[in-house]
Image (spheres, grey):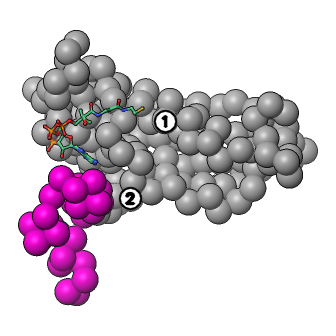
Amino acid sequence: MQAKTPSQSFTTVTDMVLPSETNPLNNLFGGELLARMDRAASIAARRHSRRIVVTASVNNVAFNRMVPLGSVVTIEAQVTRAFKTSMEVFMDVWVEDRESGERTKANEAIYSFVAVDDTGRPVQIPAITPETEEEKMRYDAALRRKQLSLVLAGKMKAADATELKALFEE
Ligand SMILES: CC(C)(COP(=O)(O)OP(=O)(O)OC[C@H]1O[C@@H](n2cnc3c(N)ncnc32)[C@H](O)[C@@H]1OP(=O)(O)O)[C@@H](O)C(=O)NCCC(=O)NCCS
Protein backbone atom coordinates (compact mmCIF):
# COMPACT_ATOMS: atom_id res chain seq x y z
CA MET A 1 0.00 0.00 0.00
CA GLN A 2 1.48 3.33 -1.05
CA ALA A 3 1.96 5.97 1.66
CA LYS A 4 -0.08 9.16 1.40
CA THR A 5 0.39 12.72 2.66
CA PRO A 6 -1.91 14.55 5.12
CA SER A 7 -2.91 17.03 2.40
CA GLN A 8 -4.45 14.19 0.36
CA SER A 9 -7.12 13.83 3.04
CA PHE A 10 -7.71 17.58 3.50
CA THR A 11 -11.44 18.26 3.80
CA THR A 12 -13.36 21.53 4.12
CA VAL A 13 -17.01 21.64 5.16
CA THR A 14 -18.76 25.03 5.25
CA ASP A 15 -22.29 25.56 6.55
CA MET A 16 -24.27 28.21 8.43
CA VAL A 17 -25.89 28.13 11.88
CA LEU A 18 -29.70 27.89 11.73
CA PRO A 19 -32.17 28.61 14.59
CA SER A 20 -32.90 24.91 15.15
CA GLU A 21 -29.18 24.33 15.88
CA THR A 22 -28.75 26.87 18.69
CA ASN A 23 -28.98 26.87 22.49
CA PRO A 24 -31.09 29.35 24.56
CA LEU A 25 -28.32 31.97 24.16
CA ASN A 26 -28.70 31.75 20.37
CA ASN A 27 -25.26 30.19 19.96
CA LEU A 28 -24.46 26.95 18.17
CA PHE A 29 -25.39 23.90 20.30
CA GLY A 30 -22.26 21.92 21.22
CA GLY A 31 -23.72 18.59 20.11
CA GLU A 32 -24.46 20.03 16.67
CA LEU A 33 -20.84 21.09 16.29
CA LEU A 34 -19.66 17.63 17.44
CA ALA A 35 -21.84 16.03 14.74
CA ARG A 36 -20.60 18.41 12.04
CA MET A 37 -17.00 17.68 13.06
CA ASP A 38 -17.69 13.94 13.00
CA ARG A 39 -18.94 14.22 9.41
CA ALA A 40 -15.98 16.36 8.27
CA ALA A 41 -13.44 14.11 10.02
CA SER A 42 -14.99 10.93 8.63
CA ILE A 43 -14.70 12.31 5.09
CA ALA A 44 -10.99 13.02 5.72
CA ALA A 45 -10.53 9.49 7.13
CA ARG A 46 -12.30 8.01 4.10
CA ARG A 47 -10.11 10.04 1.74
CA HIS A 48 -7.01 8.65 3.43
CA SER A 49 -8.15 5.04 3.68
CA ARG A 50 -10.69 4.77 0.83
CA ARG A 51 -12.59 2.46 3.20
CA ILE A 52 -15.68 2.49 5.39
CA VAL A 53 -14.64 4.27 8.60
CA VAL A 54 -16.15 4.33 12.08
CA THR A 55 -15.51 6.82 14.87
CA ALA A 56 -13.41 5.11 17.54
CA SER A 57 -12.96 8.05 19.90
CA VAL A 58 -13.30 11.77 20.35
CA ASN A 59 -9.97 12.55 21.90
CA ASN A 60 -10.09 16.26 22.37
CA VAL A 61 -12.57 19.04 21.81
CA ALA A 62 -12.06 22.59 23.00
CA PHE A 63 -15.07 24.90 22.77
CA ASN A 64 -13.11 28.11 23.03
CA ARG A 65 -15.57 30.57 21.47
CA MET A 66 -19.32 30.82 21.11
CA VAL A 67 -20.62 30.56 17.56
CA PRO A 68 -23.65 32.89 17.09
CA LEU A 69 -26.80 32.18 15.10
CA GLY A 70 -26.33 32.97 11.41
CA SER A 71 -22.55 32.44 11.50
CA VAL A 72 -20.80 30.79 8.60
CA VAL A 73 -18.76 27.93 10.05
CA THR A 74 -15.93 26.17 8.24
CA ILE A 75 -14.42 22.93 9.50
CA GLU A 76 -11.02 21.92 8.11
CA ALA A 77 -10.11 18.30 8.74
CA GLN A 78 -6.95 16.36 7.90
CA VAL A 79 -5.51 12.98 8.85
CA THR A 80 -2.44 13.61 11.03
CA ARG A 81 -1.27 10.04 11.54
CA ALA A 82 -2.19 6.61 10.29
CA PHE A 83 -1.47 3.55 12.44
CA LYS A 84 -2.30 -0.02 11.35
CA THR A 85 -6.08 0.22 11.00
CA SER A 86 -6.78 3.45 12.87
CA MET A 87 -6.05 7.08 12.08
CA GLU A 88 -6.13 10.39 13.89
CA VAL A 89 -7.94 13.37 12.34
CA PHE A 90 -7.20 16.92 13.46
CA MET A 91 -9.78 19.66 12.95
CA ASP A 92 -9.74 23.43 13.02
CA VAL A 93 -13.08 25.25 13.18
CA TRP A 94 -13.33 28.78 11.75
CA VAL A 95 -16.10 31.35 12.04
CA GLU A 96 -16.43 33.96 9.31
CA ASP A 97 -17.38 37.56 10.12
CA ARG A 98 -20.49 38.47 8.12
CA GLU A 99 -19.31 41.98 7.19
CA SER A 100 -15.52 41.77 6.84
CA GLY A 101 -15.32 38.11 5.82
CA GLU A 102 -12.43 37.74 8.27
CA ARG A 103 -12.06 34.23 9.71
CA THR A 104 -11.47 33.58 13.43
CA LYS A 105 -10.52 30.19 14.84
CA ALA A 106 -13.31 29.07 17.18
CA ASN A 107 -12.44 25.49 18.09
CA GLU A 108 -10.07 22.57 17.63
CA ALA A 109 -10.81 18.89 17.87
CA ILE A 110 -9.14 15.52 17.44
CA TYR A 111 -11.08 12.38 16.55
CA SER A 112 -9.89 8.81 15.87
CA PHE A 113 -11.34 6.56 13.18
CA VAL A 114 -10.91 2.90 12.31
CA ALA A 115 -11.18 1.59 8.74
CA VAL A 116 -13.37 -1.50 8.56
CA ASP A 117 -14.60 -4.01 6.01
CA ASP A 118 -18.26 -4.73 5.18
CA THR A 119 -18.60 -6.78 8.36
CA GLY A 120 -17.13 -4.07 10.62
CA ARG A 121 -13.75 -5.81 11.03
CA PRO A 122 -10.69 -3.45 11.17
CA VAL A 123 -8.59 -3.43 7.96
CA GLN A 124 -5.13 -2.10 7.20
CA ILE A 125 -4.75 1.43 5.86
CA PRO A 126 -1.95 3.26 3.97
CA ALA A 127 0.87 4.87 5.99
CA ILE A 128 1.15 8.65 6.08
CA THR A 129 4.16 10.89 5.47
CA PRO A 130 3.93 14.34 7.06
CA GLU A 131 5.43 17.17 4.98
CA THR A 132 5.14 20.55 6.72
CA GLU A 133 6.55 21.41 10.15
CA GLU A 134 3.03 21.56 11.63
CA GLU A 135 2.15 18.18 10.09
CA LYS A 136 5.34 16.69 11.56
CA MET A 137 4.55 18.06 15.05
CA ARG A 138 1.00 16.73 14.95
CA TYR A 139 2.26 13.37 13.63
CA ASP A 140 4.79 13.04 16.47
CA ALA A 141 2.22 13.87 19.17
CA ALA A 142 -0.44 11.54 17.76
CA LEU A 143 1.02 8.37 19.31
CA ARG A 144 0.80 9.93 22.79
CA ARG A 145 -2.82 10.87 22.16
CA LYS A 146 -3.61 7.37 20.90
CA GLN A 147 -2.08 5.83 24.01
CA LEU A 148 -4.04 8.23 26.24
CA SER A 149 -7.26 7.36 24.43
CA LEU A 150 -6.60 3.62 24.77
CA VAL A 151 -5.74 3.94 28.47
CA LEU A 152 -8.93 5.94 29.12
CA ALA A 153 -10.96 3.37 27.17
CA GLY A 154 -9.48 0.59 29.31
CA LYS A 155 -7.81 -0.98 26.26
CA MET A 156 -4.21 -0.35 27.31
CA LYS A 157 -2.46 -0.58 30.68
CA ALA A 158 -1.01 2.75 31.82
CA ALA A 159 2.31 0.95 32.37
CA ASP A 160 2.47 0.09 28.64
CA ALA A 161 1.82 3.68 27.50
CA THR A 162 5.51 4.44 27.02
CA GLU A 163 5.12 7.60 24.91
CA LEU A 164 2.63 9.02 27.38
CA LYS A 165 4.85 8.26 30.37
CA ALA A 166 7.80 9.96 28.67
CA LEU A 167 5.76 13.17 28.53
CA PHE A 168 5.49 13.29 32.33
CA GLU A 169 9.13 12.32 32.84
CA GLU A 170 10.51 15.16 30.63
C1 LIG B 1 -13.60 1.05 16.72
C2 LIG B 1 -13.70 -0.48 16.64
C3 LIG B 1 -13.78 -0.92 15.19
C4 LIG B 1 -12.41 -1.05 17.27
O1 LIG B 1 -12.59 -2.42 17.35
P1 LIG B 1 -11.64 -3.35 18.28
O2 LIG B 1 -12.27 -4.65 18.45
O3 LIG B 1 -11.22 -2.55 19.48
O4 LIG B 1 -10.46 -3.56 17.31
P2 LIG B 1 -8.93 -3.58 17.62
O5 LIG B 1 -8.63 -3.85 19.07
O6 LIG B 1 -8.33 -4.48 16.58
O7 LIG B 1 -8.53 -2.08 17.30
C5 LIG B 1 -8.54 -1.58 16.00
C6 LIG B 1 -7.82 -0.27 16.01
O8 LIG B 1 -8.63 0.68 16.70
C7 LIG B 1 -7.84 1.34 17.67
N1 LIG B 1 -8.70 1.75 18.76
C8 LIG B 1 -9.61 0.98 19.41
N2 LIG B 1 -10.22 1.72 20.36
C9 LIG B 1 -9.68 2.96 20.30
C10 LIG B 1 -9.87 4.16 21.03
N3 LIG B 1 -10.75 4.25 22.02
N4 LIG B 1 -9.12 5.26 20.69
C11 LIG B 1 -8.23 5.20 19.70
N5 LIG B 1 -8.00 4.08 18.95
C12 LIG B 1 -8.71 2.99 19.26
C13 LIG B 1 -6.82 0.28 18.10
O9 LIG B 1 -5.70 0.86 18.75
C14 LIG B 1 -6.47 -0.30 16.75
O10 LIG B 1 -5.62 0.60 16.08
P3 LIG B 1 -4.41 0.09 15.11
O11 LIG B 1 -4.89 -1.12 14.35
O12 LIG B 1 -4.19 1.25 14.18
O13 LIG B 1 -3.24 -0.15 15.99
C15 LIG B 1 -14.93 -1.05 17.43
O14 LIG B 1 -14.78 -0.75 18.81
C16 LIG B 1 -16.24 -0.46 16.96
O15 LIG B 1 -16.78 -0.87 15.94
N6 LIG B 1 -16.75 0.52 17.71
C17 LIG B 1 -18.02 1.18 17.31
C18 LIG B 1 -17.73 2.28 16.29
C19 LIG B 1 -18.95 3.10 16.05
O16 LIG B 1 -20.03 2.59 15.85
N7 LIG B 1 -18.76 4.43 16.06
C20 LIG B 1 -19.86 5.35 15.98
C21 LIG B 1 -20.37 5.60 17.36
S1 LIG B 1 -22.05 5.98 17.36
Q: Is residue 4 left or right of residue 90?
A: left
Residue nearest the observer in this picture, 119 or 103: 119
Residue 51 visible in this rendered orientation of the protein = yes
Q: Residue at x 20, y 86 (%)?
A: 169
Q: Which quarter holds ligand 1?
A: top left
Residue 68 visible in this rendered orientation of the protein = no
Residue nearest the observer in this picture, 137 or 157: 157
Q: Quadrant of residue 18?
A: top right
Q: Which SS class for mark 1? A: helix
Q: Which SS class for mark 2? A: helix
Amino acid, disc 1: Asp
- Nearer the camera: disc 2 or disc 1: 1
Q: Residue at x 24, y 78 (%)?
A: 167
- The residue wearing badge 1 is 38
Q: Residue at x 62, y 58 (%)?
A: 63
Residue 34: percent from left, percent from top: 56, 42
Tell me which secondary structure the magenta stretch mostly adopts: helix
Q: Residue at x 65, y 31 (%)?
A: 14
Q: Quadrant of the C terminus?
A: bottom left
Residue furthest to the right: 99
Residue 26: percent from left, percent from top: 86, 46
Q: Quadrant of the N terminus?
A: top left
Query: Is 99 located above or below residue 132 in the figure?
Result: above
Residue 83: percent from left, percent from top: 17, 44
Amino acid, disc 2: Glu
Residue nearest the observer in this picture, 3 or 95: 95
Q: Which residues are magenta?
A: 143-170
Marks 2 and 1, the one that precedes in the sequence: 1
- The residue wearing badge 2 is 134
Query: Is 22 located above or below residue 43 in the figure?
Result: below
